Amino acid sequence: MVAEDQEDLSDRTMSFRASVPPRPLLEPDAHLLLVHAENGPPRHIPLNVLPLTIGRSAPSEMILDGSTVSRRHCRFEREGDRIVITDLGSTNGTFIDGQRIDTPVALNDGARLSIGAYTLNYHRRSQQELAGWEALDRELAEAHDYVLSVLPPPLTSGPVQAEWCYQPCTRLGGDAFGYQMIDSQSFSAFMIDVAGHGAGSALFTVTVANVLRQGMLPGVDFHDPSAVLRGLNRMFPMERHNNLFFTMWYGVYNIADRILAYATAGHHPAFMLPAGATQPVPLGTRNPSIGIAADRDVISARESIPAGSSLFLFSDGVFEITDTEGHDWGLEQILSILPVMAKPGGPRRLYETVRKAARPGPLEDDFSALALRFI
């Protein structure tokens, strides 16, 4: 018998619930800059320690080389949960999404910054998003390295010498070029420019370049530029390759008789500069771009190459720029400065000349310039 002052618990169901751990505090967003490097993958700069000053030399904490960047160019600071950028009276200015700033500006996610010749993107990401983004960035960096791996090393000796400069306008470009001995007396060279940019164009570019490097056109004589262009047309019709097509210059130089056979497909000419000359000679033929017309005949031509001559191959990204005064360049503007390519380090000198003439920010297209010198 239960005492009256005691509660009977025998008929009650009792349950126990584990204590709920406190919810973790949300991790703060990450603020970072994506710096697009020349001829290399972009690099991430976390904005963890602020203020941060960008300039070309100390005492700036982040250094960007080059004369287009002022010694103390701009400063990043935190205001609440936002990042604010201030131009520090730089010579060439600080631009956000194409607009020069003269007062402090709070950055929005994805803002595109132009600091001299450099392009940076500001991003605000959760820690989870950042991890996934960095994984993708590593994969794109590997793809960029693979594109570079199909480009040939410079040639500093032999009957034909070669050097080049390659600067994609995005992380993955659509240009490629190459050269090699077909046999003991025949030297081939090519320049291709695939329509568009990004991963799709880059993968297509590498595919075409590898076909040419390895001679993978069935039944095609690689000594014959017309046959090479016809073979590429058969292999790469645009309707079977995501509507991608490409322009091309292809030539074969016979070392014994000093004759260059060449053909172009939708591409501007290459230019030969004989020793001692000041006016380059155009070498090109009129044919449609590769992938557009598979069964058309191809026109080729031949040219005698005097000893000491140079041959310049380049993509249209070399001359399709807007200069600092807002004028659009074309092929004729580049011809006056093209002879700089004949000197040692010429392709790089040409890039620096074009980069200096162009308005701030990245070039509008991939820059590919190849100089061949015939001994």
Image: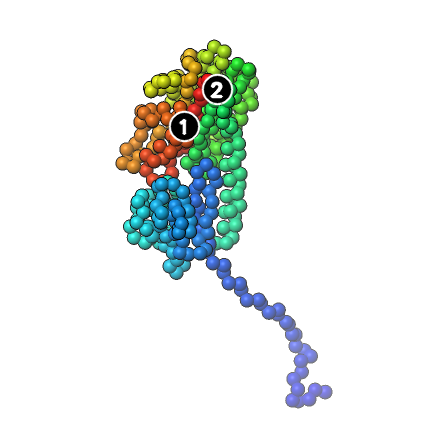
Q: Position of residue 314 (x, y in %)?
A: 41, 26
| Quadrant location, the N terminus | bottom right
**For the residue carrying disc 2, how many other residues have a C-alpha within 10 Å: few (<14), some (14-19), or many (20+)?**
some
The kind of residue tagged 1 is Gly
Which circle marks residue 160 in the picture? 2
Q: Is residue 254 visible?
A: yes
Looking at the image, the residue that sits furthest to the right is 1
Residue 336 quadrant: top left
Q: Is residue 288 visible?
A: no
Total numbered labels placed on residues in the image: 2
Q: Position of residue 352 (x, y in %)?
A: 38, 33
Describe the element under mark 1 as helix, strand or loop: helix
In space, the residues marked 2 and 1 are separated at their CA atoms by: 16 Å
Residue at (47, 24) in percent of width and height: 162
Label 1 near label 2: C-beta < 8 Å? no
The kind of residue tagged 2 is Val
Residue at (29, 53) in percent of width and height: 103
Residue 20 quadrant: bottom right
Q: Nearer the viewer, residue 93 or 143?
A: 93
Which circle marks residue 346 in the picture? 1
Q: Position of residue 109 (x, y in %)?
A: 40, 50
- In the displayed structure, does residue 74 sit left or right of residue 185? left
Q: Nearer the viewer, residue 193 or 371?
A: 371
Residue at (35, 41) in percent of width and height: 68
**Considering only order in the chain, which callout, 1 or 2, is on the residue closer to the N terminus?**
2
Asked if 246 appears above or below 64 in the picture, the reply is: above
Asked if 356 appears above or below 77 in the picture, the reply is: above
**For the residue carrying disc 1, how many other residues have a C-alpha within 10 Å: few (<14), some (14-19), or many (20+)?**
many
Q: Nearer the viewer, residue 127 or 369?
A: 369
Describe the element under mark 2 as helix, strand or loop: strand
Residue 318 quadrant: top left
Q: Position of residue 97 (x, y in %)?
A: 34, 45
